[in-house]
Amino acid sequence: MDNERSRSVFWPVVMIVIGVVWLLGNLNFGIPGFNFLLFLRLWPLLLVVVGINLIIGRRWPLLRAAVVLLAIAGALAYVYLAPGFGLAPGPEIQHAEFSEPLGETESATIFIGSSVGKITLEALNDSSNLFEAKLDYIGEVEFEVEGVAEKTVRLDADTGDFNLDYLEILDVEELEWTIGISQEVPVVLEFSSGVGEILLDLSGLDVTSVDLNGGVGQTELRLPALDAGYSVTVSGGVGELLVVIADGAEVDLQIDGGVGNIIIDVPDEAGVEVRADLGVGNIDVPREYDMTGGDSQIIGSSGTWESPTYDGADRRIEIEFDGGVGNLEIK
């Protein structure tokens, strides 16, 4: 009977301890410096304890209980103390700089695939280069350039074995990309976001099209006013997106899906048409805009709105939104 009672305690104790630790982690409570993800990585220790339980459990129930308690105490101590002793380091942070001279370039297509960290992209000033980048990163980065007059530049990050769990023990603010692109030639830009804060200030660039694949984090996209119109496509993403359109711009802006609020800042007197079909959320447009089609629903909204100056505008901003989850605000 004693053995049966002792055996019945093993799994409840293990489940209670794991459940309490996991719950505290989800609620953001616990010991300062304690890493819950490191604790979960010690799950193979559970197999060891189970094996010991099967070997000695029936003969020495008290010893079995002591082994369980020691294993749990050891796991907690390791997770709390390991980072301080450098026993559980995060991935190595590396630094690199890349550049490509402008040379005979007449136009360029630039592909950028980011990973984790803060990204700032803006126009180059007083530079003879087409492209410059300074990176603090993890994993591997590939930089390739093809062509002479029509160049293709590709900067792509590969985190390899990096796991997002490392974000718990890695100071993401140490990972920063600073990228500059020449103002002298027309550019097609394709940008794939990773995890982190993104600022794409294109206000000084001569872009012919922009394709932004959203990641996770806050993104700010600043669009220029150019002699010719251009198209911008934004796909997916989780987090807030702010799009700022310069006065005098002629833009065809299409936004697909995503989770999070989207704010589009348009010039006050611009000719604007908004065509939106929202999944879950609300659409907020200026009061003076006229609704020319569509309807509103309890869950999700759809419709077409035009600014008072839209019909007579020589340069127009066309916004098409096929939404996911979150609010759309035009201001």
Image (tube, grey):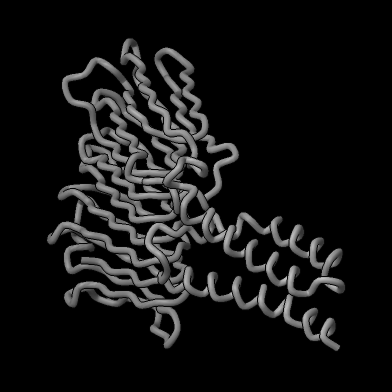
Residue at left 42%, top 86%? 297
Residue at left 30%, top 33%? 178
User: Residue 17, image x and y in percent?
Assistant: 60, 73
Q: Nearer the viewer, residue 56 or 36?
A: 56
Using the rendered view, name the quadrant where residue 95 is placed: top left
As drawn, 126 above or below 195: above
Judged left or right of residue 206, residue 67 is right
- Residue 318 shows in this picture: yes
User: Residue 200, image x and y in percent?
Assistant: 30, 43
As drawn, 92 above or below 131: below
Q: Nearer the viewer, residue 293 or 208?
A: 208
Number of on-image labels: 0
Q: Nearer the viewer, residue 252 or 300?
A: 300
Quarter of the image with the C terminus is bottom left
Using the rendered view, name the quadrant where residue 101 is placed: top left
User: Residue 67, image x and y in percent?
Assistant: 70, 64
Quarter of the image with the N terminus is bottom right
Residue at left 33%, top 44%? 118
Residue at left 33%, top 40%? 174
Q: Nearer the viewer, residue 228 or 85?
A: 85
User: Residue 92, image x and y in percent?
Assistant: 47, 34
- Residue 236 shows in this picture: no
Outermost residue, left side:
269
Judged left or right of residue 26, residue 265 is left
